[in-house]
C-alpha cells in the first residue's frame, strides 16, 4: 500500500518538543493549508484545512529551534489515524501527518532550508 502526503502551508502553533525516557525527540505542531476556488456563480471561495503534525528525531529538534507559529513549510510524510475515547466514553479519531521530510520555505535569514530524511541542510 502507498501512504504519502505533501502539504504546503503555515504552522498553526510553535513546535512542542518532548523527549522519551530513552532520549528520542518528539515534536508536535499543526499546519494550515488553503485552497482557493471559484464557485459556480464565479465568486471566489477559500477553504482552510488544519492538520496536526508529528515530528521525530533531528527533524523535531531543528523544527523546534528554527520554526514558529506562522512559519511557511512544506511537509512530506504519511497519514496516521489516532483513536481514543473522550471523557464521556465516546470514540474519537483524527488523522495526523507523521513528517518524514520538512522544508522551511521562509527566507534563508528566517529559516535554514530542508530538514529530515537524508537531505538535511542545517543553518
Image: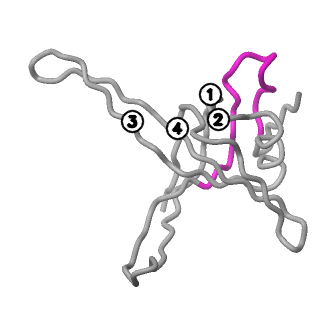
Q: Give the quadrant of residue 41.
A: top left
**Residue on which the image places disc 4:** 7
Q: Earlier in the sequence, mark 4 or mark 1?
A: 4
Q: Residue at x 56, y 54 (%)?
A: 78
Q: Are marks 4 and 3 in contact (CB under 8 Å)?
A: no
Q: Earlier in the sequence, mark 4 or mark 3?
A: 4
Residue 29 point in image, percent of width and height: 63, 48
In this rendering, is residue 33 above or below 60? above
Q: Are marks 4 and 2 in contact (CB under 8 Å)?
A: no
Distance from the alpha carbon under mark 4 to that under mark 1: 11 Å
In this rendering, is residue 61 above or below 93? above
At mark 1, the secondary structure is: strand
Q: Crowdedness of circle 4 by 10 Å Cα count: few (<14), some, many (20+)?
A: some
| In-image side of 52 versus 120 (left or right) | left
Q: Residue at x 48, y 62 (%)?
A: 1
Q: Earlier in the sequence, mark 3 or mark 2?
A: 3
Distance from the alpha carbon under mark 4 to that under mark 2: 16 Å
Residue 32 point in image, percent of width and height: 50, 37
How many tags in the picture? Answer: 4
**Residue on which the image places disc 1:** 72
At mark 3, the secondary structure is: strand
**Residue on which the image places disc 3:** 48
Which range of residues does the magenta coloring cover? 98-115
**Residue on which the image places disc 2:** 69
Between 52 and 112, the one nearer to me in the picture: 52
Q: Earlier in the sequence, mark 4 or mark 2?
A: 4
Question: From the image, which quarter does the C terminus lie in?
Answer: top right
Residue 64 point in image, percent of width and height: 78, 43
Amino acid at each position: 500500500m502507498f501512504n504519502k502526503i505533501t502539504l504546503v502551508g503555515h504552522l498553526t502553533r510553535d513546535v512542542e518538543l518532548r523527549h522519551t525516557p530513552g532520549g528520542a525527540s518528539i515534536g508536535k505542531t499543526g499546519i494550515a493549508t488553503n485552497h482557493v476556488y471559484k464557485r459556480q456563480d464565479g465568486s471566489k471561495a477559500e477553504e482552510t484545512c488544519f492538520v496536526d503534525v508529528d515530528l521525530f528525531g533531528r527533524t523535531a529538534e531543528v523544527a523546534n529551534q528554527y520554526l514558529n507559529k506562522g512559519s511557511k513549510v512544506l511537509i512530506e510524510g504519511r497519514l496516521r489515524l489516532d483513536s481514543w475515547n473522550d471523557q464521556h466514553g465516546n470514540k474519537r479519531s483524527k488523522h495526523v501527518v507523521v513528517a518524514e521530510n520538512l522544508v522551511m520555505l521562509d527566507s534563508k535569514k528566517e529559516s535554514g532550508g530542508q530538514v529530515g530524511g537524508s537531505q538535511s541542510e542545517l543553518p
